[in-house]
Image (tube, rainbow, N blue to C red):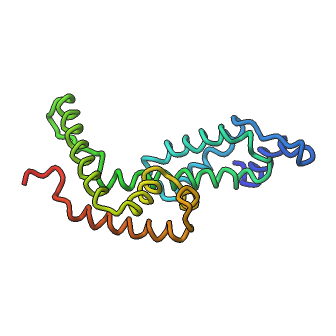
Amino acid sequence: MLTWESRQAATLAAAQAGPAEDRVAPSFETVYRTWYSHVARWVRARGANDADVEDLTQEVFIIVRRKLGQFDGRNLPGFLFRITERTVRDHRRSSWIKNLLGNRAALLPGLPAHEVDTLEAIEMRERRRALDAVLAKMSEKRRTTFILFEVEGYSGEEIARIESLPVDTVWTRLHHARKDFMRLVAELPSLGSDA
């Protein structure tokens, strides 16, 4: 089994053969083959669910394939780790709202597939209406920041640039928006109940 250092050395040997301006990124196939298991462990270490590890690892390598031409040939593990970090963070951001309001209909045993699909569609419509109602009760400033960060995946710094605000204001709005959101969701009648 190759050690961390020998993997890095083998992967970067060709890329670092000459002066900095002559460096070329290693081939995607080499990076994928050499680093896949490390990236999968990093995804897991960043807190991804076991069910999501393989998908997120593949997503990381889709990004790596797209950005490998921009890689400067130095610190490949750092390059891969940052992409992994951001991919897992973005996944977590987008999934916490989905998990809260759910896009997971309980599959009822014995129902034909088309009835389950109909039930899922009805439940999704109910959840979407509930989400819209919650968002409508939030102030416009907080709602905008919340949606840009939690749903659209913008960073705090990006939101600050878009809205011409100090970054601290973005974080304050986001903090209050999350509190508002959780309070308003808790006030919702139970979704999907017969009562």
In this rendering, the answer to whether 155 lies above or below 23 is below
Residue 54 x/y as whole percent: 50, 43
Is residue 170 or residue 58 the one in the foreground? 170
The residue that appears at 56% across and 49% down in the rendered structure is: 40
Q: Which residue lies furthest to the left in this view?
A: 195
The residue that appears at 42% across and 69% down in the rendered structure is: 175
Quadrant of the rendered image containing residue 25: top right
Q: Residue furthest right?
A: 19
Residue 14 x/y as whole percent: 84, 41
In this rendering, the answer to whether 59 lies above or below 111 is below
The number of numbered badges drawn on the structure is 0
Residue 168 vs residue 183: left or right? right
The residue that appears at 18% across and 38% down in the rendered structure is: 119
Residue 5 x/y as whole percent: 76, 54
Is residue 140 or residue 58 the one in the foreground? 140
In this rendering, the answer to whether 158 lies above or below 37 is below
The C terminus, quarter of image? bottom left
Quadrant of the rendered image containing residue 125: top left
The residue that appears at 74% across and 36% down in the rendered structure is: 27
Residue 172 vs residue 33: left or right? left
Residue 164 x/y as whole percent: 56, 61
Is residue 174 or residue 19 the one in the foreground? 174
Is residue 122 or residue 32 the one in the foreground? 122
Residue 3 vs residue 135: left or right? right
